[in-house]
Amino acid sequence: MREILYAPWRTEYITHEKIEGCVFCHIVEHPEKDEELGVLYRAKHSFVVMNKYPYTPGHFMVIPNRHIDNLENLEEETWLEIARLTQRGVKLLKDVLNAEGVNIGMNLGAAAGAGIAEHIHMHLVPRWQRDTNFITTIGNTRIYSTDFFKIYQKLRKRADAYFGR
């Protein structure tokens, strides 16, 4: 028997305009759409953006501006900026969302599980004690306990103070 989880707030994801080409390059090229696209912060060589299909509330990514599919050829200056933004992003998640832990990681290449393998990106996933439950394992379904845009606004309001230092 197939179970249905009613989630009317997901309609926007389904009906929203489809982006042609690399979604991350689209974000780089359209700073005027930062709020619509969930951008938290733009730095010189990279940007911070909410994950539209998060594992947990507040899941965001740090992404180089340059379209590149491998870490080994990324400029050191860009890598250091990504590392700095990642470090500050952990603090943002702990301070603003009261995350008790944070998973950080990159899936480099499709074989490693990258959903968008053609443009590398660093994930920051906030975690809390007991934040997983049976439905993820048994039902292969994620429960997002709060409105995506409320979390975005909460993080965006404080992002410059953390990332812009």
Image: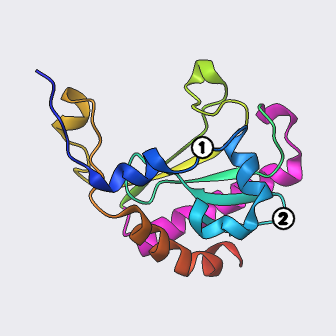
Residue visible at 48% across and 68% down? 152
Query: Is 9 left or right of 41, judged from the image as shown?
Result: left
- The residues colored magenta run 70-99
Give percent across and percent down for residue 46: 77, 57
Q: Which residue is mark 2?
A: 44
Q: Is residue 90 magenta?
A: yes
- Res 81 → quadrant: bottom right
Q: Secondary structure at mark 1?
A: loop
| 148 to 72, vertically: above or below | below
Q: Secondary structure at mark 2?
A: loop
Instruction: Please name the amino acid that badge 2 sits on.
Output: Lys
Magenta segment, prevailing SS (helix, strand or loop): helix
The crowd level at tag 2 (other Cα within 10 Å; few <14, some 14-19, many 20+) is few
Disc number placed over residue 93 in the picture, else none: none
Q: Earlier in the sequence, mark 2 or mark 1?
A: 1
In the rendered image, the quadrant that contains the C terminus is: bottom right
Query: Is 89 left or right of 58, judged from the image as shown?
Result: right
Residue visible at 78% across and 31% down? 70
Q: Nearer the viewer, residue 110 or 11?
A: 11
Residue visible at 57% across and 31% down? 115
Query: Is 96 left or right of 42, judged from the image as shown?
Result: left
Disc number placed over residue 18 in the picture, else none: 1
Q: Nearer the viewer, residue 100 or 123?
A: 123
Asked if residue 22 can be seen in this view, the reply is yes
Q: Is residue 7 magenta?
A: no
Asked if residue 53 can be seen in this view, the reply is no
